[in-house]
């Protein structure tokens, strides 16, 4: 059981209601997170949704799986909408539908009480991720002190996300060998969501950043090693540990302050910044989707912020 608990999020400990339904129900509940969900982020989000819903049921006096009805799920989602955003409510409902489907196919429950419940409407035409102006992005990169290994690492990581549209998860999961020469140009190989592997050539700036970092940190001698690692301030050297997303976020906040960037940015900012800059310079939406490894251009459109500049120009016409 220890190995299973290493995989299952701590918050997905067996709820009392599930435990009361017997060992088969408890096992099926754990199996949902281990065998059915491979993405760790989805696993955490679904675990949080399940535990909070079962806690809510317990507060309402529901103590058996068989007693859960669609009315309970609908009431829970209705209450959730009053305090949380529509996307959060939709995600929680999706988690419950998938979990109860899993329990039904495992013959733990006769029907799925969440199947008939409709979630809130939520239409997104433009993403909310903060985007940097190209001049701001250049200002941030130029402000990084690259006389140290950590400076070389940070510039290379930020540059990778800007110029290759890489997600932070794919970026920090790279190994040294995932930056490789092909046709006299440096390429990067990214392991994206859903097990998809994506490769693309480097922009000349990114090529320079990666070469400087790999050479400066002495990483070329160990191609199987992680490319982006944590930093030991006492020794001034990189460790062998992977750089967590939370640490990458903290680094970006620190670099933004050092570059006097006023926009509130995050890990995903650079992906959206790169896509927008590419489209502003004449790139096509179809090519941007291919470079970002999006299955649909509709997803890529969420990263396109060119319309915001048009809006700003129109606002400035109000001359008083």
Image: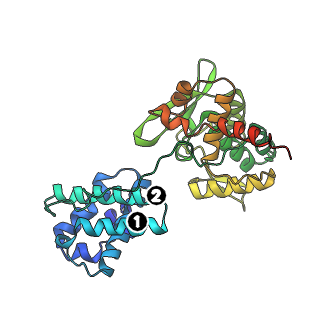
For label 1, the SS is helix
Residue corresponding to mark 1 = 48
The outermost residue toward the top is 183
Residue 140 occupies quadrant: top right
Image x and y of residue 48, in percent: 40, 65
Residue at 86%, 47% in the rendered image: 320
For label 2, the SS is helix
Q: Residues within 10 Å of mark 1 (few under 14, many from 20)?
A: some
Residue corresponding to mark 2 = 86
Of labels 2 and 1, earlier in sequence is 1
Residue at 59%, 49% in the rendered image: 128
Q: Is residue 244 visible?
A: no
Image x and y of residue 183, in percent: 59, 17
User: In 3D space, how far apart are the residues under numbered discs 2 and 1 (Cα atoms)?
Assistant: 16 Å
* Depth check, front residue: 194 or 172: 194
Q: Is residue 200 visible?
A: yes
How many numbered discs?
2
Residue 13 occupies quadrant: bottom left
């Amino acid at each position: 059981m220890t190995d299973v608990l290493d995989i299952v999020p701590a918050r997905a400990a067996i709820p009392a209601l599930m435990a009361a339904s017997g060992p088969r129900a408890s096992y099926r509940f754990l199996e949902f997170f281990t065998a059915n969900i491979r993405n760790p982020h989805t696993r955490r989000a679904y675990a949080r949704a399940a535990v909070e819903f079962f806690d809510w049921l317990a507060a309402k006096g529901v103590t058996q799986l068989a007693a859960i009805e669609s009315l309970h799920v609908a009431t829970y989602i209705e209450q959730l909408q009053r305090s949380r955003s529509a996307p959060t409510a939709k995600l929680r409902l999706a988690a419950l539908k998938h979990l109860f489907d899993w329990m039904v196919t495992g013959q733990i429950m006769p029907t799925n009480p969440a199947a008939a419940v409709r979630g809130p409407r939520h239409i997104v035409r433009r993403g909310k991720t903060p985007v940097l102006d190209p001049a701001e992005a250049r200002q941030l990169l130029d402000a990084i002190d690259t006389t140290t290994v950590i400076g070389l690492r940070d510039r290379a990581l930020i540059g990778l996300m800007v110029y290759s549209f890489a997600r932070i998860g794919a970026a920090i999961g790279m190994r040294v060998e995932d930056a490789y020469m092909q046709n006299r140009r440096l390429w990067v190989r990214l392991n994206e969501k859903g097990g998809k592997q994506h490769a693309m050539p480097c922009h000349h700036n990114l090529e320079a950043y990666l070469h400087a970092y790999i050479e400066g940190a002495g990483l070329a001698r160990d191609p199987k090693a992680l490319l982006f690692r944590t930093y030991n301030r006492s020794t001034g050297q990189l460790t062998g540990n992977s750089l967590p997303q939370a640490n990458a976020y903290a680094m970006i906040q620190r670099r933004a302050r050092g570059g006097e960037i006023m926009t509130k940015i995050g890990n995903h900012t650079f992906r959206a910044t790169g896509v927008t800059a590419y489209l502003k310079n004449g790139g096509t939406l179809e090519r941007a989707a291919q470079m970002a490894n999006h299955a649909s251009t509709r997803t890529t459109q969420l990263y396109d912020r060119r319309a915001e500049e048009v809006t700003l120009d129109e606002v400035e016409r109000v001359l008083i």
